[in-house]
Image (tube, coloured by chain):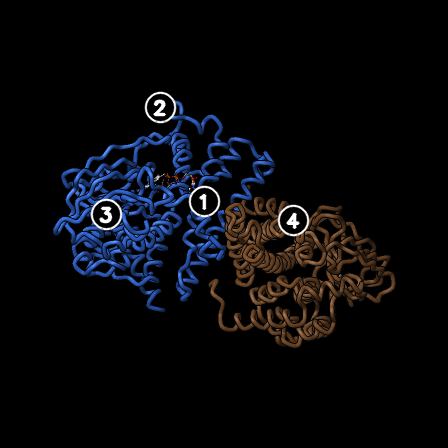
Amino acid sequence: MSALDDFRAEARAWLEANCPASMRTPPSSDDEDTWGGRRATFFSDDARLWFERMRDRGWTAPTWPRAYGGGGLSEAEGRVLEEELRRLGCRMALKSFGIWMLGPVLLEAGTEEQKREHLTGIARGELRWCQGYSEPGAGSDLASLGMRAVREGDHYVVSGQKIWTSHADKADWMFCLVRTDPSVPKRDGISFLLVDMASPGISVRPIRLISGNSPFCETFFDGVRVPARNLVGREGGGWAIATSLLKHERAMIARIRDARAEAEEALESIAKRVLGEARGEVADRVVRAELAQLGIDVLANKLALRRAAEEVAAGRPAGAESSMFKYCGTELGKRRREMRVRLLGLSGLGWEGEGFTPAELSATRDWLRSRASSIEGGSSEIQLNILAKRVLGLPA
Amino acid sequence: MSFVLTEEQRAIAKAASDLVARRAPVAHLRALRDSRDPVGFSREVWREMASVGFAGIGIPEAHGGSGLGLTELGLVLEACGRALAPTPLVSTVLLGAPLVLAAGDEALRARELPLVASGERVIALAHEEGPHHAPTRVTTRAEPHAGGFRLTGEKSFVLDGHVADAFVVVARVAGEADDPRGLALFFVEASAPGVHATRLHLVDSRNAARVRFDGVTAAATLGVPGEAFALLDRVLDGARAGLAAEMLGGADEVFARTLAYLKERQQFGVAIGSFQALQHRAADLYCDLELTRSVVLEALRAIDRGDPEAARLVSAAKARAGTTFSRATAEAVQMHGGVGVTDELDIGFFVKRARVADVTFGDSAFHRDRFARLSGF
Ligand SMILES: Cc1cc2nc3c(=O)[nH]c(=O)nc-3n(C[C@H](O)[C@H](O)[C@H](O)COP(=O)(O)OP(=O)(O)OC[C@H]3O[C@@H](n4cnc5c(N)ncnc54)[C@H](O)[C@@H]3O)c2cc1C
């Protein structure tokens, strides 16, 4: 037995002993997720217990060094753990922008002091982070951002506005991009700052989405004082950090499994139930062919992800494939959501209240939410631009 | 079994692409077409491929083969696909030989398989009877005769049928068309009295023939008469996956040529590849190709490891290979502009091959339907 097999057996036994039964079922709504933070809330006692056990084991950030609150696992062990979590159907013990986005770049570009100050709090779910990139005038063209940070002694004074800041109203800290030098070409005047959301001068206003939720906000900065030691990298060196973080973000968006989608009634079975079946087959031949195409594409996408992971594990440098998976994954997700409401007919168009099952109401909301997936984290068009230039080498 | 190629597999892929680049680039197919070559492939090139072991992949070492699997054969087919190299790989190595190996008696195997492995013998499958792939739509009859069987019927699409040395013929001992029961496999020498092969000139300049069997006496019966369908479908799955690998090679090559043209062709004072309308189409096609590649490779591996999901994966692979290859060739023509529709440029050969390969062993619609059935809906 290889060391990896030993680890798998050990991980499996630990998860079986420690993951509460209710945490092995898919959540029925986003409200059941655990995000941690100073104002952490838990949907249930089991959710708290599961979070605390995973945290104490270092498995909220399994591949980070132990010194920073992580689990100290190798990449290969991390993948095994992911497989075992999936096999048991475990919920994510902690969802966290800190773990998915900020942590990896702090490990790459942070000072020892910054790593010690922030990583442990992130891994242990003590602080919740939000991402302050987009501004009203800087969306896809992120580098044109204008929120100013002026150095005054050992502080930066920050003024301006961010928008679409997911969970800004619930976050303790923000990692953000600011303009420290407006006189140089736009990519060279950007810096990467860590800001405590409790600082005086920050105000947050939630924005409501077409799905009815309001997971993101406008965030206003008015003369906010940020200690200079919260600058990551050098002043003016924020763009490279920002883009490296986006790569982690894209990979995360493509990879994070839609636990709820996996637990939902399969599209094929909805089709049989709603449209009827003939000899065990979906009776409507047109819908059946579309379902088959969707099933084939989902399968191919899954295999492509696995192939890329195996190739990278075998030493191929990780490239711009995160753009491909972000693009393919979100476009496929939209097709699935669209298909679900189409199949359900009016039952998939309920907004709230009596007359609809919770699953039907989720179908409506998820369909609307899925529309954001190909915009957030760099739109589909931006991913195609990246692929055309970086992978295919087409001229600008 | 991982997606990452082993040392040996990489060596096979390299040997195949070197040999094909040297002996059978697209110009080779063009020359065969223009000279109306009666054979339709080069026996010399085929013997050279056999000499490095390509014809013996899938044949046990005891019978002169290399004992390698479909994953390795897929690498060779992909290399051939890039150059549209015409060889008996599909007719003989993917179909004829595996059927003889799986169902022939020891004497037949010992006689035929070493000849296949050395590139001396083409064994074609005589199966299809209509314009669309319909594995059970067989009406060719097999009647008991003098301790064996006599075959009567007409096959509409036999790969390499006019140059085959022998055939594996699918015929019916019982039942009506579309019944999977009642099918049987027979080994027939091409020289047997009553075999009439007429070459078909298809749009892709590759080999196919119509073959009539007029009361032909079968030289051997392969397997149990009436119960051939399971084996036939299993071997067809190997051929479908192998053909998908060839198609993947073709799609990849035609995309590479298009990409090169996008960088080289200037209009409005800039390379046409700087136009975003074309960049996005190219990037989307790239993703399409990557997804198709993943499912084709997995289908080949699934067969090699005897995965019960193999048939479903094969249908996913063949369906995607069909649409991706057609799309890659259509985009290639459009992005090449006027030269794209000239015979002088090779692109047209890829366009034509994509259509024929899609229809062969079931087009995308056939495999979507089969995927749905195998998935339980
Ligand atoms: C649910 C959700 C959560 C988000 N969370 C956060 C967050 O936490 N923090 C944060 O900072 N931001 C967040 N965002 C913002 C997100 O990153 C931006 O919405 C995104 O970058 C697009 O910017 P925009 O909305 O200004 O659209 P625009 O950039 O104005 O784009 C409009 C349209 O033009 C297209 N377009 C733009 N430029 C090009 C081009 N060069 N070529 C071709 N087409 C182009 C786009 O693809 C799009 O279709 C979130 C967005 C959503 C939807």
* Label 4 sits on residue: B363
Which structural element holds mark 2?
A: loop
Q: Which sits earlier in the primary sequence, circle 3 or circle 1?
A: 3
Q: CA distance from mark 2 to mark 3?
A: 32 Å
Mark 3, residues whose alpha carbon is within 10 Å: few (<14), some, or many (≥20)? many
Q: Which residue occupies the foreground of this view, B240 or A371?
A: A371
- In the visual, does B182 lie left or right of B9? right
- In the image, residue A273 above or below residue B108: above
Q: Chain of mark 3?
A: A
Pointer 2 residue: A353
Output the chain of dot 1. A
User: On the image, numbered disc 3 is attached to which residue?
Assistant: A51
> How far apart are the alpha carbons under marks 2 and 4?
47 Å
- The amino acid on which the numbered mark 1 sits, given as a three-letter code, is Glu
Amino acid type indicated by mark 4: Asp
Discs 3, 1: same chain: yes
Labels 2, 1: front one: 1
Query: How far across and down, in percent of the image, does residue A372 sit?
Result: 39, 38
The chain letter corresponding to blue is A
* Ligand 1 neighbours mark 1 (CB distance < 8 Å): yes
Q: Residues within 10 Å of mark 4 (few under 14, many from 20)?
A: many
**Element class at badge 3:** helix
Q: Residue at x 70, y 62 (%)?
A: B91
Q: Is residue A299 left or right of residue A317?
A: right
Q: Residue furthest top?
A: A354
Q: Quadrant of ligand 1?
A: top left
Question: In the rendered picture, chain B carries what hue?
Answer: brown
